[in-house]
Amino acid sequence: MSLLTKNVAVAQNSQRPVKPKLAMCNFFSGINKLRQFAIENGFSGIDWSFDVSTLPGAPAEESKWVRDLSVFEPLEVRYHCPFHQQDLGHEDPAQAKAAQVLFRRVIRLVARAKGKYLTIHIGLGHDSTEPLSWKATIDNLEQLVQYGTSHGVRICLENLVWGWTSKPNLFEKLIRESGAAVTFDIGHAHACESVQNQYYAVEDFVTPHFDRTFNAHIYHTEISGVGHIPPSRLEDIKDRLTILENISCMWWVLELREIDGLLQTKKVIDEYLEKTNENHSCSSGRSW
């Protein structure tokens, strides 16, 4: 029995399973259009990625942004900072401080919108970890986690396809020593070198954090220069979806930013959930 299986056995019981919420990214320009598309296609949430260049500035702009996002109700909204080369642990203290100021500004925005989760990255947009300090990363990430907690926002660190967070052993240290939660990107986990060379398994990213993995990014894999690739069939991602189900991660972001790939992934996920439902019905006599 794997460590993951032993861990999740503690969390699992005979209660009726909860169906995960399926979320989509905010790749439409209009909020009303985005909401309509989400509801019409069976999504329960929006994973809102901020753009540094369009962050609201003045208090009046912030208030308008909060009012605009209220249109999404009853959909749940969670938040994401895919900010390139904005690193809390930059070896240049001035750049590290600027990143801290930026992320704290976003946390206050999320809190105003009554958001509870914010996903961030370490090393996004860099070609190497040379510009980063390990100690500064840990210290400043811990401070950001505490700042988020004081505003009711859970800071979640995402695993990337390269760098420190692409190695489960280093990812574990970052999470443990900073107190951050986890956003598990199953496509990054599939594509990263540490898994491709079989030194680690995909589940190693979440084995130590089964009780604090609150978000998942779902697609098949990432190809350099191409981007996120949707699954062509359930077998492409079935094992990784089972990991998410076993650790009770209930927020599944189908992280495709074009309609065909998004709906193809949604079709595969629906097939998985339908089969899971059927299996549970057969074993317990109950359905979701």
Image (cartoon, rainbow, N blue to C red):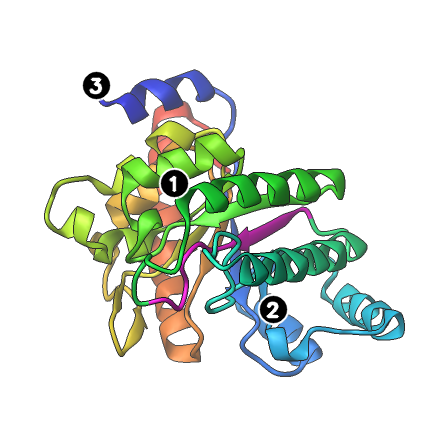
Question: Where are the magenta residues, as a range?
Answer: 116-126
What residue does disc 2 label?
50
Task: Pick the residue in front: 277 or 167.
Answer: 167
Whole-percent x, y for residue 239 in the image: 25, 44
- Determine if the magenta segment contains residue 187: no
What residue does disc 1 label?
244
Q: Indicate the secondary structure of the residue bearing disc 3.
A: loop
| Residue 13 seen in render | no
Label 3 Cα crowd, 10 Å radius (few <14 / some 14-19 / many 20+): few
- Determine if the magenta segment contains residue 121: yes
Q: Residue furthest left?
A: 197
User: At x 32% / y 39%, what residue is drawn?
Assistant: 170
What residue does disc 3 label?
1
User: At x 29% / y 58%, what residue is drawn?
Assistant: 161
Task: Pick the residue in front: 161 or 42.
Answer: 161
Q: Amino acid at mark 2?
A: Phe
Label 2 Cα crowd, 10 Å radius (few <14 / some 14-19 / many 20+): some
| Residue 279 seen in render | yes
Q: Tell me: residue 201, above or below residue 237.
A: above
Q: Amino acid at mark 3?
A: Met
Horizontally, residue 159 falls left or right of residue 20, namely: left
